[in-house]
Image (cartoon, helix red, strand yellow):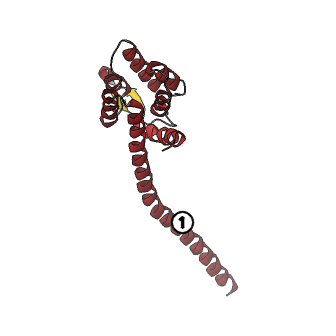
Amino acid sequence: MTALTTLNATNLAISFLYRGSVTASAGARQFAPLPGHVPVPANTGALLESGVPLLSAIALAKGVIVNRILAAGIDDVAQNLHRGGRMAAALRVSAGLPIRAVQLIEVGEVSGKLPRMLEKVAEIYDQEVETTLKRLLSILEPALILGLGGLIAVIIISILVAILGLNELVV
């Protein structure tokens, strides 16, 4: 998989992977919809592959984030890393990522293959996004057909009523 394809796949996948976090009571984070793309793992993975240090890669990747809540979570991760903590532990606590993604990142940290694991996270969630979109379209298609059929039926009935109304005027 080329780096550009990985970046594009990750942009889409991570927008579904991390749906934004909303602070709830007692400081817990919950998932909420997040419009647009969140390219942090893709950008971080590409920068790490290029030899950029992790803290710098996270700081650079954070620069493309529009969502303030996600940016604050990434700031927490960067601060934890600066203090010597692990990225996966910081993500688990502050970023609100799904546990599977955090576990993959943790495996990447331990094995020394973090850029590859970030790509793997993007691939997994890209497949999930693809599957979800296919399911949505398979539901949407019959609904559109029924809706258009109903609209055509209403048009035909209105034309027939108008024609029958003209017949009554002539007689």
Q: Which residue is mark 1?
A: 148
Q: Position of residue 151 (x, y in %)?
A: 55, 66
Amino acid identity at mark 1: Leu
| Residue at x-position 49% and y-position 41% | 6
Quarter-of-image position of residue 72: top left
Q: Is residue 118 left or right of residue 148?
A: left
Residue 32 visible in the displayed image? no
In this view, 59 is above or below 138? above
In this view, 147 is above or below 110? below
Disc 1 crowd rating (10 Å Cα; few below 14, some 14-19, many 20+) is few
In this view, 53 is above or below 111? above
Q: Position of residue 26 (x, y in %)?
A: 30, 20
Residue 145 visible in the displayed image? yes
* Secondary structure found at label 1: helix
| Residue at x-position 41% and y-position 50% | 132
| Residue at x-position 50% and y-position 66% | 145
| Residue at x-position 46% and y-position 35% | 34
Q: Is residue 102 left or right of residue 168?
A: left
Q: Nearer the viewer, residue 30 or 44?
A: 44
Q: Nearer the viewer, residue 58 or 151?
A: 58
Q: Position of residue 171 (x, y in %)?
A: 67, 87
Label count reads 1
In this view, 115 is above or below 57? below
